[in-house]
Image (tube, rainbow, N blue to C red):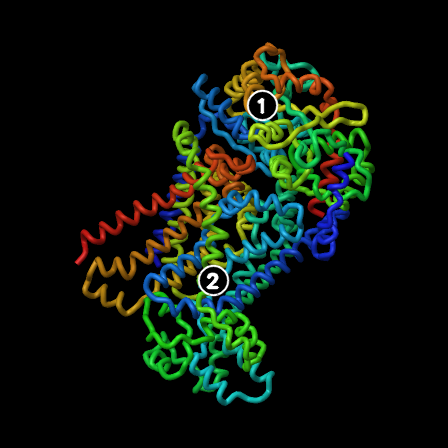
Amino acid sequence: MRKKLTLIALAVALLIGISLWWQAAHSGALVVYCAHDAIYADSILHDFEKRTGIPISIRYDTEATKSLGLTELLIREKDNPRCDVFWNNELLGMTDLQERGILQPYKGSGYARIPAAFKAPDGSWTGFAARMRVIIFNTQKIGTTPPNLTSILPGTDLSRIGIAKALYGTTLTHYVVLWHEWGGGKVRAWHRQWRADGVKELDGNAAVKDAVAEGACYAGFVDTDDYFEAKDDGRPVAMHPVELDDGKTICIPNTVAIIRHARHSRAAKKLVDFLLSEETELALANSKSRQIPLGPVPEDRLQPDVRALEPWARKGVDLTALGPARAECLAWLKTWYTP
Amino acid sequence: MSRLVEDLVHPVTGISLAWGFLPNGSEPMGIGAQTTLALVRAIFIATLATLASGPTSRWLATQRGRARLLAWGLLVVPFFTPTLLISYGMVRFSIALIVSTWGHEALYVGVLGLKLFPVAVVIRVLLPPPLSAEGCYTYHLAAPASPWSQRWFHLRAAGQGPWIAAGLVFLLAFADFELASLWSVKTWTMAVFDAQIGGFALTDTLRLAAFPFCIQLAVLVALILSRKDSAIGRTESSFPSRFKKPHGAPTTAAVQTRKILPLRANPSAHEFASGLKPVRDEAPMAQRSLCAPFKSLCALCGKIDFPLWLHRCRAPFLPWLYLAISAAFVTLIPLGIVIVQAIPGVPRLFENFVLGRELGASLLFAVGATAAAAALVTFTPRSRVPALFLAAPGLFGALTISLIVLALFQVPMLRELYDTPVPLVLALTVLLLPLAFLLGALWLRQTAPLYIARQIPSRRLIWELQNRPRAIACAILFCWAWFDFTASSILAPTGFTPVFVRLHNLAHYGQTAVLSAMMIAAFATPVAVLLLTGTALHLYARGHGR
């Protein structure tokens, strides 16, 4: 018995030792929560690490819970934050964090170059490198004319139309925009009708893109980066931006913010300025995801796909005023998905 | 647009709506409905696995030498195949089935069933019927006329094995999360995950999981109660002594009897563990036939006189066919697809190898959890009750356990350990314990040869009889921890992501050569680690052996 107790005590001591060592070893690293795709964000963040010598510890979100998982985690950690910088892949979650007082305002050199429509007036968060919400469709299945999915009549079989679960990511933003434009009642009725008509609800935008690219679904809602992946793979797909009733589009920027009481605020400011720089926006624009720069960049350094998107992006609906719509829409979606 | 509308008119939706369990979409599917759906699936899988596991376990006992090794290998390989590999390899197939609710459901249930069937077989091997085949045969000779008496007899004669096998398979199928999340299947674990990610307070999330948790708890309590000695005693004592199997391992008498009676006794755990070879006799039709599962069903229903067509139905190759199809469908085909795709991606991966940190993280967590689980199994008293109480929580599934551990490390006293490897190692250990105790029951038994080896003492013999089985058990646990995704995605500390969480995210971008190469690297690493460790241990044993 004594031997067993000794072993247990040793094991507990070992665990505590490992934990203390772990915390000491990682105390100097800048903690970044990143909801943007790791495949694109990794190179940017590691480039910053190389240039500045500031070590970075990154926590990515899982693909299926893009953005919402980390937003909720930050809310839970509000009293004891671990994160220094939050790189979100959408905007509405940031406004929620701003309202909760979780973000530390910062207006650096990066903030100055971004247009006012894409940043918080107090500097709590700043947008950069946007994507657009688009309809992707399989040209072998339905030709090259873009389908108008928003005007489909009730009762039409939608089993070949894909959409990601609305609880997360940019599909949530899409819903919030509709909630703002149409009102909650119409969105609820539309959502119910589409489910009744058999629309395929998939885990994320990437799954929708795969389903359309493979021809299992004929059309679906995704973001521009998903579409370009399918296109680069040589799949028979085309896209058209989602247009609202008034002709506006949905342009969703990445956003970055410093967390209040961040342990590494100086390093955090450096990273925020780096992410908002022209160089980072160009890197993201010329990556496979073709993200649209929000600040001024030399046009000749952009690839044609991005230049073609810019007029659509300029017609983007103002997302900064959608905080209340987001709260209402998300509350309803939560009751829908976890009743 | 008109073409789109034409194409959209598809019969699939109507068919899918016909199945009452599946949602028609116009109303949200509550946690109750999702639990019912998972319940129906789990009962279906558990029933099929239990019915088929009896004949399969008996057939396995007839295999010898390399055939035996191959049969066991083919049997268990689907269980140890990571769900990510299956999902990634079958991505095009599963996408093609997206539009068919039935097809999608069938794929999920089929793969889950194939993955869990080995559990039922191993349990049936470990817990053979208390009644020997000879006793059963004798009973048939003097069987009472009443079909109800016969039915009751067969239910008791089957012993605890089928019930425990069914219970375990049920628990594992009911608590599945990884495969369900990869294929967007509606089940209660997905609803709980959505609630957790969607910002419910942890207590609310766990409250949501209360109903399914109660179901699991009820099954678990039933399993624990059925494993008490009293239950065994009641079952055995209720048979007349002439029908009872002699205590202990299959006796010489039993083996000799098989020469006389054209029936095969079920192998015991001891026989399985020690490789005791019963006398090979003429192939009994009942065990090798195509219809063995049907015969099991007939027997359990009290129908002793099988129809003539069932007797004539002989197909000794069918178990092999099943094993080959199962292993090919769940493991070999997805693995083959990934390997073929990975070939052009390997050079590019090595040009810029980005997985080193993730592989290191996985290694640390897997080694830590394996060591903890192995130590707990070794130091737990040989009594069943503490073992069952330690192993039981792991059967609630990775999602529930991870959420509970997350809640545990939110309390002020443990908060300092929150963003460290401790929560994940703890969760993995809890998840490994059921398998660890199962392997312990198989391989950590005190046998007479081992006792003699210790008396000699021969390090090489001890290696062969004791340490090698332990090393294999640890290797299996290590792989199980290595391939975890759910607990890792919830509990991994910042900046130290295990490789499968990373790959899971990347897999959403579809199949690419580099990603396939990454998959191969993730699968090859544990194999390399185990090969190196195994070789080192083997050389150590040989170098010091007598």
Residue drawn at x 37%, y 51% is: B475
Q: Which of the 4 image quarters holds residue B153?
A: bottom right
Category of crowding for the residue at label 1, using alpha-carbon neighbours closer than 10 angstroms: few (below 14), some (14–19), many (at least 20) = many
Q: Secondary structure beneath disc 1?
A: strand
* B56 over B342 or under it: above or below: below
Q: Which chain's residue wears label 2?
A: B
**Amino acid found under the numbered disc labelled 2:** Leu
Q: Which of the 4 image quarters holds residue A213?
A: top right
Residue drawn at x 40%, y 75% is: B283
Residue drawn at x 30%, y 56% is: B468
Q: Name the residue under label 2.
A: B388
* B327 over A300 or under it: above or below: below
Say which of B405 and B476 sits in front: B476
Q: Secondary structure beneath disc 2?
A: helix
Residue drawn at x 67%, y 57% is: B36
Quadrant holding the C terminus of chain B: bottom left
Say if residue A100 shows up in the picture: no
**Amino acid found under the numbered disc labelled 1:** Ile
Indicate the position of residue A81 as horizontal and vertical percent values.
Answer: 56, 31
Q: Name the residue under label 1.
A: A258
Disc 2 from disc 1: Cα separation: 48 Å
- Left or right: residue B69 versus residue B342 is left
Label tally: 2
Q: Name, please, the residue furthest toward the left.
A: B546
